[in-house]
């Protein structure tokens, strides 16, 4: 399964909320979006429990509770756009998107 995470959300896990031109009047964010091809577009702020409940993807909880924390732990650094992390049968690709 392919899962795409947003870089800004990973950065916010480290340094706190980043305000930019896309945040003004921002509507409620849909954390998990299933694309037509079956790929999941996931906001990295999603709690791992919610991710498991809504998508069936169960990632281990260690010193983190969000997808961003998991990605930071596995990458060992802030991942760059286009980089990927593989975990079991899951491929996680980092993306910068403007999709809500």
Image: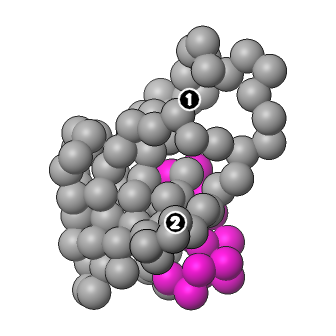
Of 56 and 39, nearer the camera is 39
Quarter the C terminus occupies: top right
Residue 51 appears in which quarter of the rendering? bottom right
* Direction front: furthest residue: 36
Disc with the residue nearer the chain's start (2 vs 1)? 1
10 Å crowding of disc 1: few (<14), some (14-19), many (20+): few
Instruction: Check residue 53 for magenta coloring.
Output: yes
Is the residue 71 above or below the residue 40 in the image?
above
Q: Helix, strand or loop at disc 1?
A: loop
Is the residue 22 above or below the residue 35 in the image?
above
Quarter the N terminus occupies: bottom left
Residue 73 appears in which quarter of the rendering? bottom left
Q: Nearer the viewer, mark 2 or mark 1?
A: 2
Q: Which residue is mark 1?
A: 16
Of 62 and 58, nearer the camera is 58
Q: CA distance from mark 2 to mark 1?
A: 28 Å
* Region rendered in magenta: 44-57
Q: Residue at x 23, y 39 (%)?
A: 80
Q: Which mark, by number, is residue 48?
A: none
Q: Which residue is mark 2?
A: 35
68 on left or right of 94: right
Q: Residue at x 80, y 35 (%)?
A: 27
Is the residue 17 above or below the residue 57 in the image?
above
């Amino acid at each position: 399964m392919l899962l795409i995470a947003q870089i800004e959300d990973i950065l916010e896990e480290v340094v706190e909320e980043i305000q930019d031109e896309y945040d003004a009047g921002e509507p409620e964010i849909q954390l998990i979006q299933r694309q037509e091809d079956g790929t999941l577009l996931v906001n990295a702020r999603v709690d791992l429990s919610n991710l498991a409940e809504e998508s069936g993807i169960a990632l281990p909880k260690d010193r983190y509770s969000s997808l961003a924390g998991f990605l930071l732990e596995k990458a060992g650094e802030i991942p760059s756009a286009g980089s990927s992390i593989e975990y079991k049968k899951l491929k996680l690709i980092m993306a910068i998107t403007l999709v809500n």
